[in-house]
Image: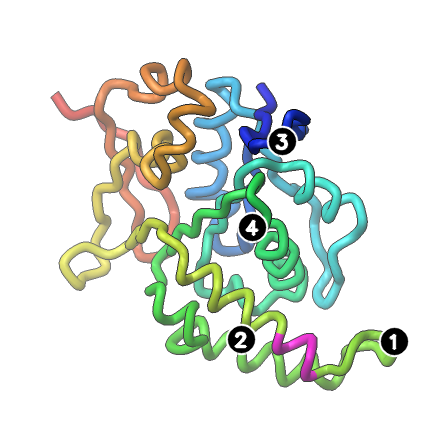
Amino acid sequence: MASTSSASSSVQKIFKYDVFLSFRGEDTRKTFVDHLYLALVNKGIITYKDDETIKKGERINEQLIKSIEESRYYIIVFSKNYASSSWCLDELVKIMECQKMTEHTAYPIFYDVEPTEVRNQSGSVGQAFERFTRKSKRTLEDEDLEKELVVGKWRNALKEAASLAGMELKNTFNGTSRPRPLSWDAIARVIFILSPHLFRVFPHHLPHLLPSPRNVGINDLGTLDKIYCIH
């Protein structure tokens, strides 16, 4: 089902997608994001997930920009290498532009990174961003805006997105690299946990998004271990 805006205007905007997933493929595509995507679409929530193979340095295309505009909610999965992709960063800038409109809402998920790392471009996120921006300043095309302005937009988008209410997911347990049990329910419910607004948008989906308790182990490489039921 596609959602509609509940704005005070008599004309409601109709969205093509309920949810748009923004993520760094090499970090999370085969793990958390794929499971979250399947959990959502299996319950009838129309979710956009870009599965194209993106070449390094490639900028987002008009079709992707349109898909962002046509989505009601955004789930941004920040990971260690998210800020090392111009595609992800340009995507984030567009998402935050739409976020400022009343019809759109964005939610960050911090996958094995701290919100402060994203907000301040520090730690592993900052290192990836710094390496990437140094390279980008040398390769950005002349017809782009001033190079510093482009990088400034990326920084502002990271800061704004990381300041939103969201969720942290860790792939370590008690400071060790052994698998940490990650609630399978949390994957299915993540979008509902983050905002009460979604209960009004998808109220009839909620009971069905709570399967029997399961855990998924995520090891230090970010891969998913076997799913096991808790009795």
Q: Specify start and end residues of the magenta stretch as a single range.
A: 148-152
Quadrant the C terminus occupies: top left
Instruction: Give the amino acid type for the residue marked by disc 3 in the picture.
Output: Ser
Q: Which residue is mark 1?
A: 143
* Crowd band around label 3 with a 10 angstrom C-alpha radius: few (<14), some (14–19), many (20+): few
Out of 218 and 209, give the one closest to the viewer: 209
Query: Looking at the image, is 113 positioned above or below residue 229?
Result: below
Q: Earlier in the sequence, mark 4 or mark 3?
A: 3
Query: Looking at the image, is 175 positioned above or below residue 62?
Result: below
**Numbered label attached to residue 99:** 4
Q: Earlier in the sequence, mark 3 or mark 1?
A: 3
SS of the residue at dot 4?
Answer: helix
SS of the residue at dot 2?
Answer: helix
Out of 51 and 15, give the one closest to the viewer: 15
Q: Choose top left, top right, bottom left or bottom right for residue 188.
A: top left
Q: Earlier in the sequence, mark 4 or mark 2?
A: 4
Q: CA distance from mark 1 to mark 2?
A: 22 Å
Query: Viewer-nearest of labels 4 and 1?
Result: 4
Instruction: Give the amino acid type for the residue marked by disc 1 in the picture.
Output: Glu
